[in-house]
Amino acid sequence: MRAARRLAGLCLLAGLCPVVGIGLAPVPSRAAEAFLTAQNADAVDVVDLDGRKVVATIPVPGAPAGIALSPDRSAVYVTAPEGKALVVIDASARRVARTVPLGGGPLGIGVSPVSGAVYVADWYAKRLWEVDPKSFAVVAEIPVGTSPSGIAVTPDGRFLLAADRDDDALSLVDTATRQRVAAIPVGTRPFGVTIDAEGKRAYSANVGSNDVSVVDIAARREVGRVKVGERPYAVALSMGRAFVTDQYGGTVSTFDTATLAPGPRLDVGEYPEGIQASPDGRTIYVANWESNTLTVIDAAALTVTGTVKTSDGPRAFGQFLR
């Protein structure tokens, strides 16, 4: 592990003072590209998933970390904590189209699959920004808990969840009223949060207690907890399993989402962080911050099938497949 990292003006080590919030949006039948925030390189890599190689590198100042895509996949939204901004990338042109100043410490990001509204977590304050996807104006500040990190939006767009790391809770927000309607206790220091395709359950990676909380969204309570590897960062869901990046372990833990029984633990790169399943669920992609790689996993066979070299410091904190 490097002796020093660019921590984007924050202590982004997920175990002690961190930075996947993963929201859900309509996706095509397959993913052709991955957009990876490379924080140490001040860039976003574009990876050809079929060719398994970087085909473009887009300069993005400000230590890019969080990432999400518009519902139609035409825009890529990137948080730049050091730049205190939201950066909008034209996905087809592979260039920065706009920079939206925010202030604070923009980190996690999620997008409504219905309205396209962009939600950004302010790590330094107990708030989320809501950004209009057409005007790019900040239209609201939504109160949440302490040190919000990951964000996920339900498939119907009615609710969002924010992982309030220093409150050991998830904030449940009604997106219509922009009000926090519940604080749901989970494990210690939740960081990444993911919602299933049905919008019924959420999964938070708890970096302080080395486990994943399973939350019934309608009941607004934790209904299970699963031990995983050291310093879990984010969760992806596929084929009835959860896949969890273990930062300190250099592994991806798995468990059955129905029984919560643990499954195999897979070796990936050093310091894995961002993780996402392909739209067809057959492949899992993992960004490894220290190894500067993207690991490819066969979700059915539970085997690593490939590795792609990337720019320095890939985090891919959020949705990054297009």
Image (spheres, rainbow, N blue to C red):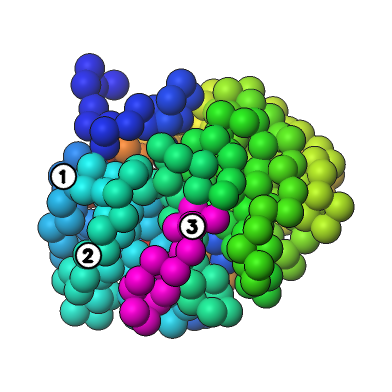
Specify the amino acid type for callout 2.
Answer: Thr
Secondary structure, mark 1, is loop
- Left or right of 292 in this view: 244: right
Secondary structure, mark 2, is strand
**Disc 2/disc 1 C-alpha distance (Å):** 18 Å
Q: Identify the mark nearer the N-term, 2 or 1.
A: 1
Whole-percent x, y for residue 6 in the image: 22, 32
Whole-percent x, y for residue 63 in the image: 22, 44
Secondary structure, mark 3, is strand
Specify the amino acid type for callout 1.
Answer: Ala
Which of the two marks, 3 or 1, is nearer to us in this view?
Answer: 3
Q: Which residue is mark 1?
A: 41
Closest to the observer: 88 or 84?
Answer: 84
- Over which residues does the magenta segment extend? 128-142
Whole-percent x, y for residue 22 in the image: 52, 55
Which of the two marks, 3 or 2, is nearer to us in this view?
Answer: 3
Please report the residue visible at 23 percent of the width from the left and 42 percent of the height from the top.
82
Q: Identify the mark nearer the N-term, 3 or 2.
A: 2
Q: Which residue is mark 2?
A: 99
Pointer 2 local density, CA inside 10 Å: few below 14, some 14–19, many at least 20: some
Please report the residue visible at 56 percent of the width from the left and 29 percent of the height from the top.
166
Q: Which residue is mark 3?
A: 141
Pointer 1 local density, CA inside 10 Å: few below 14, some 14–19, many at least 20: many
Q: State which quarter of the image contains the N terminus.
A: top left
